[in-house]
Image (cartoon, helix red, strand yellow):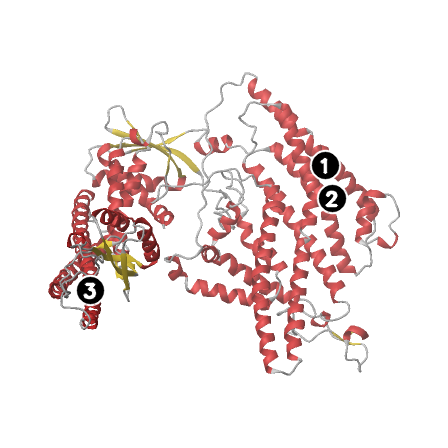
Amino acid sequence: MAENGGCCPPMDLFRSEPMHLVQLILPIESAHLAVAYLGDLGLLQFKDLNSDKSPFQRTYATQIKRCGEMARKLRFFRDQMLKAGLTPETRSALEDDLDVDSLEVKLGELEAELIELNANSNKLQRGYSELVEFKLVLHKAGEFFQSALTNAEARQREIGSTQTGEESLETPLLEEQTTDQSKQVKLGFISGLVPKAKSMSFERILFRATRGNVYLKQAVVEHPVTDPVSGEKVEKNVFAVFFSGEKAKNKILKICEAFGANRYSFSEDISKQAQMITEVSGRIAELKTTIDIGSLQREKLLQTIGEDYEQWNILVRREKSIYHTLNMLSIDVTKKCLVAEGWSPIFATKQIQDALQRATLDSNSQVGGIFRVLHTKESPPTYFKTNKFTSSFQEIVDAYGIAKYQEANPGVYTIVTFPFLFAVMFGDWGHGICILLATLYFLAMEKKFSSKKLGDIMEMTFGGRYVILMMSLFSIYTGLIYNEFFSVPFELFAPSAYACRDPSCGDSTTMGLIKVRDTYPFGVDPAWHGSRSELPYLNSLKMKMSILLGVAQMNLGIILSFFNAKFFRSAVNIWCQFIPQIIFLNSLFGYLSVLIIIKWCTGSKADLYHVMIYMFLGPTDDLGENQLFSGQKTTQLVLLLLAFVSVPWMLLPKPFILKAQHNDRQSGQSYIPLQDTDESLQSETAHDSHAHAEFEFSEVFVHQLIHTIEFVLGAVSNTASYLRLWALSLAHSELSTVFYEKVLILAWGYNNIFILIIGIIVFVCATVGVLLVMETLSAFLHALRLHWVEFQNKFYEGDGYKFYPFSFKLASEEEE
């Protein structure tokens, strides 16, 4: 960690917090409370000392099972509340009078009561639904018999004049035309309700099963009815099936069961039907009253549960996480103590000791917890103290890889360089203001959105709100430099320094421009926009600027590798890695950057492509008109020689020096003086990955060869990669121009309000969809790549692991 000395402020993010491995010895009676206080503190990452045991073999498996059962009951309550349209009340703090044992009893009683209420309610509701269906059957099926009786009376009157009075209304409706009374058949019938969707299939199956020896009558029920079995609203038909014989009856009953048709029997006597309807209506009214009383009682119970639900849920989650942590501790042979090991930041030592002392006092334990620092060769986890502003920038780095313990953290520089490189590609202060307004809305709604569940894309955008804020501010800055507001230039800081060559000219693209005033004070002169020289001028400016920015950032990466080597006391990395790398990069591309600046300052016409190419192909050739300063040829020869020397310098010495150091360690230096904690940790986590492993010279040499080739080729490809700053900036500018000129200005030229409105809508949609969404995402990803590949590969290993302390706050955030 950077020392807080002198005039410089502390750089907490530059290196991860110093960590140490600690051992806690906790008496059984205070262990639970100690772990609870450490969970509130959230600065200790416990190690699992029982990794060889299954979850069921651990000490507190029973308690975890109890907590799991309580959590199940709480989930059941939550589901019931959601079905009833109730939401649990939220409380900020946990009440002290809550006790797990009494809560377990209370939850059991409430669950039993709620289950009983649900069972009674379901039973009553089913009976109510059956009575409603029965009433429908009585009405609809009764109509069948009423209409049949009416038809029979009419037929009786019709044939009364031609026949004697032998036939009467008591004669069966369907009978065989025979005089033999013994062969007359009395028809049976079955009535009920069948789902409307299945009624056609039901009819066909009945016909086929009985070979047409049934008579089916159906009537549609106007409104859906609640099915007694499923409890859902279903559209149904009332049916009555008339049949003959016991065999047919059995077949019909089986078909009814298969189709889910509910059967209801009633009397053929019409007077009895009316009496049954009256009875059923009375019973329905009674059941409705009983159901309403039960619903009120259930709702009242759920409201009582909802008042304390969040409190109970927090307590159960805390208890479960405490017992999970206690299961990671090893139990002493005497079974009176629990032994814990874990990583914690050095600054948290006093806080952890205070938490242990408080647990001892609050649990009335006779013995206090013991805190010890252990010495280890194991690499500690990486922990950066971040706030809501720096955390999103740190996550950009962590997405590539977690920093190795105490190596230089690129997150510090990413806060500035990432939004700046984005803005170089997205330079338009009009677009920057649009993104700024959207971000300010997120910041204004921060409290509301933090406690609310958002969609995946919305949540990602909200999480990176401070990154987007910086991106928008830098975009406004670079947009002012480019002098572009939706591709339109403005004379913001002064009038243009240029005017038409001919006073009568009206088109600067054909007549050219001459300088008439002082140079425009800030950014690109607005007169360049729309001129014949705009594209060549901006191309040259942005391309050279991209190279300067790229070389500067790559140099920063190599300088950070020096600070890493210095911090880890690795002289071999300073002399055989940092120095040749900085020489090689600056002999070629550092020199190119100097030439660009000299050309800008002197206004020379020299061709820099020619200078750089012939620096390799003809280093002794005369430069001619491409000479920018005296002694240039000698300088180029020296730089070329340094570049060639630095390649074997990177490749050869380091493996041999490492081999010699390894031999020295093996040649009888068995006893070394003990070091203090900080030094031992630093030396044990040396930056060189071959420090403790068995030394294989061939492996080390091949590793160094790959590293050297990668750096040499990367110096060229990485510099070329920064040209994406120029390419995307140009693409953004040209797209803005096309949308402005070919949509908005073109629509304006028609002098038609309808076309103008359409043009404005198309312009807004294109600007938002393409420039503010797709271009933003594109520039973001390219800036991400420049940081991950071109910048971080110079110094950042990123093979550490993150510090995950035991914390109730972190656990609740993960569950949400």
Q: Vertical placement of 809 versus 150: above or below?
A: above
Q: How far apart are marks 2 and 1 (CA)?
A: 10 Å
- Give the mark toward the camera: 3 or 2: 3
53 shown above or below 299: above
The three-letter code of the residue at mark 2 reads Ser
Q: Report how far apart the C-alphas of labels 1 and 3 lie in the structure.
A: 109 Å
Residue labelled with disc 1: 646
Q: Is 187 left or right of 443, judged from the image as shown?
A: left
The reply to whether residue 610 is in sight is: yes
Type of amino acid at the residue the image marks with label 1:
Ser
Question: Which one is earlier in the sequence, the residue at label 1 or at label 3?
Answer: 3
Residue 644 at x, y = what percent?
76, 37
Query: Which image quadrant is residue 130 in?
Result: bottom left
- Amino acid type shown at disc 3: Phe
**Element type at mark 2:** helix
Q: In this view, does 254 lie above or below 580?
A: below
- Nearer the observer: mark 1 or 3; the answer is 3
Q: Splitting the image into 4 quarters, where does residue 735 fall?
A: bottom right
State the mark number for residue 145. 3
Labels 3 and 2: the sequence-earlier one:
3
* In the image, residue 488 above or below residue 787: below
Q: Position of residue 353 (x, y in %)?
A: 31, 38
Residue closest to the eye, 551 or 529: 529
Check if mark 2's residue and mark 1's residue have beta carbons within 8 Å.
Answer: yes
Q: Mark 2 points at which residue?
A: 587
